[in-house]
Amino acid sequence: MTDPARRPDVAAIYFPSWHADPRRDEKLGPGWTEWELIRAGRPRFPGHYQPIVPQWGYLDETEPANMRRSLQVAGRYGIDAFLWDWYFYDGDDFLNRPLDETYLALDEPEVKFALMWANHTWIDVFPLTSKKEPEVWFPGAVDLAQFRRLVAVVVERYLSSPYYWRVDGAAWFTVFHIQELLDGLGGVEAAAAALTEFRAAAEAAGVGPLHLNAMGGWQQQGIEVLAALGFDSFGPYNWSDLMPRDQGIEVDYARWRADAAAQWRADQDAADALGLSYIPNLTMGWDSTTRVDQDDQNVPSSWPMLPVVTGNTPAEFGAAAADLRAFLDSRPDCPALTVNAWNEWTEGSYLEPDERYGLGYLEALHAALPGRSDQP
């Protein structure tokens, strides 16, 4: 990456589940957060790092001092934006207080933000238990009326912020699950029309143009559907789709990393064929055993009952980041990359410091992908 001006923006995915939320209080009791799951974690095999202990403690992310520290540290280590898991069900917010009440109230945050509309169906995995079928809390699919309400909120509340993340002048907006979008809006043609409306609404409000990014859920219909829908780019949320389900509970990070590098190349070829930008992902780790009842066996099958990635030391993560940098050196027009994740503690994928390695993951990321201010 010899030209600092062409360094892709680095967007770390932010999971806002570390605060009290009134809609969740109704389900799990007043003040419940996913820290309860983290505290309860137990080792599933010898050497398994559980319980995971966050170095900054079981923080409340709505506290301004905690949010400011996260932004300062992220900015120091070369992260340009938080790609925020953003939830909007039944015409109302869910888990959005840290963004709406805290981040947006700060002066000159060190890291910009953008929305990743997490439009998946929300089920009760707090924790998942074999004793009952998980309850569906909020369906992910939305009809056109709900989508228009969502667009109005996005345009009015977020895109007007001077700290909204823009790439090549366009406001970034990610749709997490394309199949849910199609199911709710009634197919490819109707969904394409709705996304065109979204672009027009942003332009009319003076906050466009948009960069529409797809993250998953197109596999049922094929990647060509993304071009038909008018997306600008695509890329994965993390590497969990590359996780073998039939080889035991442990997966070695070095093997996972090699599979991800092969996937970057295959996805880039598909993007080139369709005229889309490809947004590669770098994933720090995976361990979702805290989302499974600690008295249940964790037999790998479907999320969240997946294997645990082991050997994901800061050195190995840094090697993966170096692999990605080498991949990007031959693709100077790549606008951005994503990192999973800033704080996905209950999926074992986080850059925030833990008691085992401290700031090691951030240091490794920064060494391989230094920020623009660090470039010669």
Image: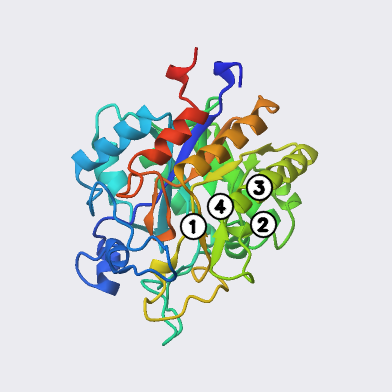
Q: Nearer the viewer, mark 2 or mark 1?
A: 1
Horizontal placement of 329 versus 12: left or right? right
The dot on residue 258 is: 3
Q: Earlier in the sequence, mark 2 or mark 1?
A: 2
Residue in view at x 37 percent, y 29 percent: 75
- How far is the residue under mark 4 from the one under mark 1? 9 Å
Residue depth check, mark 3 versus mark 2: number of the one nearer the observer: 3
> Secondary structure beneath disc 3?
helix
> Is disc 1 placed on a helix, strand or loop?
loop
Q: Label 2, on which residue?
A: 218
Marker disc for residue 253: 4
Residue 162 is at least partly visible in this image = no
Q: Amino acid at mark 3?
A: Ala
Query: What's the residue at 59%, 30% (across, down)?
Result: 335
Q: Secondary structure at mark 4?
A: helix
Instruction: Give the mark nearer the N terminus: 3 vs 2.
Output: 2
Label 4 packing within 10 angstroms: few (<14), some (14-19), many (20+): many
Amino acid under disc 1: Trp
Query: Which amino acid type corresponds to the residue marked 2 in the rendered image?
Result: Trp
Any part of residue 171 in sight: yes
Does the residue at mark 2 contact the one at mark 1 (Cβ under 8 Å)? no
**Image depth: mark 4 or mark 2 in front:** 4
CA distance separating discs 4 and 2? 26 Å
- Crowd tier of the residue under label 2, counting other residues whose Cα lies within 10 Å: few below 14, some 14–19, many 20 or above: some
Residue bearing the label numbered 1: 286
Image quarter of the N terminus: top right
